[in-house]
Structure formats: C-alpha cells, structure tokens
Image (tube, rainbow, N blue to C red):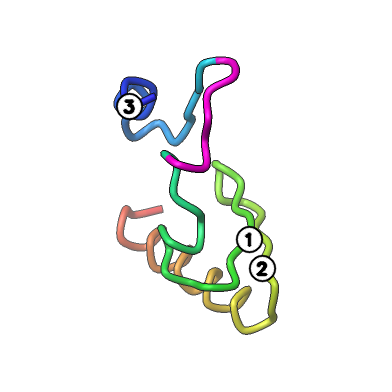
Amino acid sequence: MHEAIKAAGQGHILELPRGAPTAAVVPSLAAVCGIEAASFCHNGRFIAAARSRGAALAMAKLAVKEALSIGV
C-alpha cells in the first residue's frame, strides 16, 4: 500500500492493489484539506462536493488559492 502511495507521487492518481484496504491508509478528504464537510474532489479538481454551502465555498477558495500558487 505504501508503495502505491509513493508511486503516485505528484500525479494525484493512486492505483491501489486489488482488494487492498483503503480506510486505514488513505486519509479522508476532510482530513487532508482541513474542511470538515468536504466529501468529494475529482483528481483534476474541476468538480467537488461538500455537505454544506459554507464548506463548498471554502473548498472553492482553497482551489483558487492553490491554482494561483502554481500559476494556473
């Protein structure tokens, strides 16, 4: 499992071995982004979902901030 995470690198695509447990190894989106109600974000970051309007706006602000920081 850890090898799969290392292999993904900055590519944002994690290919896990078939049957591999994920909950114990892969942190939740909310834990990674710091937005408690975050529930989904596509790898390409062009669509995301949250359990509240406030969380959706916070995710959008975070996405814009990241895009600006890398010059997109």
Residue 21 on the magenta segment: yes
Which quadrant: the N terminus?
top left
Instruction: Give the vertical position of 68 relative to 3 (above or below).
Output: below
Q: Secondary structure at mark 3?
A: helix
Residue designated by label 1: 39
Three-letter code for the amino acid on which mark 1 is drawn: Ser
Disc 2 and disc 3 in contact, CB within 8 angstroms:
no
The answer to which of marks 2 and 1 sits earlier in the sequence is 1
Q: Disc 3 or disc 1, which is closer to the eye?
A: 3
Q: Are marks 2 and 1 in contact (CB under 8 Å)?
A: yes
Q: Marks 2 and 1, Cα distance to the nearest angstrom?
A: 5 Å
Q: Percent x, y for residue 45?
A: 56, 50
Q: Amino acid at mark 2?
A: Ala
Q: Quadrant of residue 53?
A: bottom right
Task: Give the amino acid at mark 3.
Answer: His
Q: Earlier in the sequence, mark 2 or mark 3?
A: 3
Q: Which residue is mark 2?
A: 50
**Image-based side of 39 in relation to 72, left or right:** right
Gap in angstroms between the C-alphas marked 3 and 1: 23 Å
Label 2: state its secondary structure.
strand
The kind of secondary structure the magenta stretch mainly shows is loop
Q: Which residue is under mark 3?
A: 2
Number of the front mark, 2 or 3: 3
Q: Position of residue 49 (x, y in %)?
A: 68, 62
Is 45 placed above or below 57 here? Answer: above
Q: Which residues are magenta?
A: 18-24
Q: If you read the primary sequence from the N terminus, does the residue marked by circle 3 or circle 1 appear first?
A: 3
At a point 70% along the width and 72% down the height, the residue shown is: 51
Residue at (52%, 35%) from the top-left corner? Answer: 22
Q: Is residue 70 left or right of 22 when viewed as pictured?
A: left
Along the viewing direction, whichever of 9 and 71 lies nearer the viewer? 9
